[in-house]
Amino acid sequence: MTEKLIQTLDSVGKPTELYRSPDGSTALILPYGGRILGLFTPESDENFYWTHSALESVPSAADFYESDQWHNSGGDRTWLSPEVDIFFPNFPNTEKYWQPRQLDPGQYQVVKTDRGLQLNNRLKVTLSRSKQEVELQITKSVAPAPNPLQYERALTDLAGIQYAGYTLCTSLELESAGVEVSAPVGLWNLVQMPHGGDMLVPTYVRTNPKLYFGSIDLEDLIVSDHLVRYKMRASGEQKIGIRAIATPGRVGYVYPTRDGRWALIIRNFFVNPSGQYIDVPWDNTEDMGYSTQACNVNSDLGSFSELEYHVPAIGHGTGHTRCEDVAQVWAFRGSRQEIDSIIKSLLTSEQ
């Protein structure tokens, strides 16, 4: 799968880069869109991430990238918030949703440094509510993320587990007006995974997720004292948000693989309830403070589940013109019993 994906993308003028960690984990980087398009263990070329079905052949990939539609290749991408300012050009009218092409795919430049490969995207965005144009730079790089269970000798039942991981380092910087002039903007990182799994969001206290859009059946959203379990299997598009004050900054997604095993993807990120989390529900722009989101998509956009998190904003009211975020992805593949054991160790005992 790895080689076929690389060859397809190269054939349509979208060359890739490979990052290999010392433990053998491989991340497939697609500079077009600034994405981590694939994550692979040393033992397998099966991708943990969802990629667009158009990438399965050269002709369909060529048609996809030549079209004027949004080129959602898949994998791990970086957007900006607030969504209402960046993606709704006529807000509060929400009829038109538009992915700014200067953001995605952007114009990411590959820079080789002593620390490895770096992706830089300079862009200008116009915020729909203030009508202000903001000049920004997004910088991304990848580093190792060794297995977080590497020293847990008590876990003796994980001999069949495959592991891959990486650390994503992302920064956002204002390049135009000063901090008191520029309206606030924030980093928003999202990873797309195969549809039909369960999102597991540990919480400090019992918390009710905010429904951003769509409708979710009661049996698909299970809230307990220290866990939100979202069964992402419905048709259409739905999204929930969970407040920063309730979340420790570790979210998992578990799904069955095609060979009868199970995969678990965990994102480990920093949540700062003192920070300015400015992404808001579309129907209440005063309701700030959401750090963690999950989006179910099973529509003409594709069939995938998104694990999303936000970074505290920079710009007016924050005191900052630059921010840096460091987060890990830990991915495991094995039997259901093995995966459940990892869930209990890294996420929650509430199964």
Image: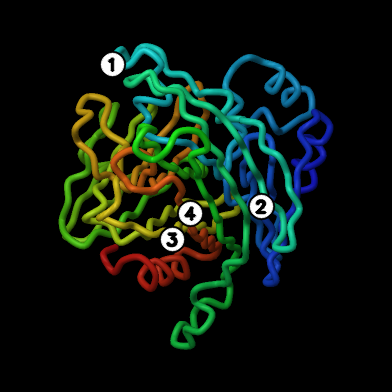
How many residues crowd around disc 2 within 10 Å: few (fewer than 14), some, or many (20 or more)?
A: some
Q: Residue at x 72, y 17 (%)?
A: 66
Q: CA distance from mark 4 to mark 2?
A: 31 Å
Q: CA distance from mark 3 to mark 1?
A: 33 Å
Three-letter code, disc 1? Pro
Marks 2,3: beta carbons within 8 A = no
Q: Nearer the viewer, mark 4 or mark 1?
A: 4
Q: CA distance from mark 2 to mark 3?
A: 22 Å
N-terminal of the pair, mark 2 or mark 3, is 2
Q: Residue at x 68, y 21 (%)?
A: 64
The quadrant holding residue 233 is top left
Q: Residue at x 59, y 61 (%)?
A: 166
Which element carries disc 1, helix, strand or loop?
Answer: loop
Location of residue 271 with respect to 318 vertically, above or below:
below
How many residues crowd around disc 1 within 10 Å: few (fewer than 14), some, or many (20 or more)?
A: some
Q: Nearer the viewer, mark 2 or mark 3?
A: 3
Rendered image: mark on residue 268: 3
Give x and y (percent) for residue 308. Answer: 41, 44
Three-letter code, disc 4? Glu
Q: Nearer the viewer, mark 3 or mark 4?
A: 4
Which element carries disc 3, helix, strand or loop?
Answer: strand
Residue where numbered disc 2 is placed:
46
Residue where numbered disc 1 is placed:
92
Residue where numbered disc 4 is placed:
324
Q: Nearer the viewer, mark 3 or mark 1?
A: 1
Compare residues 300 and 64 and report the one nearer the observer: 64
Which element carries disc 2, helix, strand or loop?
Answer: loop
N-terminal of the pair, mark 4 or mark 2, is 2
Three-letter code, disc 2? Glu
Q: Nearer the viewer, mark 1 or mark 2?
A: 1
Total numbered badges shown on the rendered structure: 4
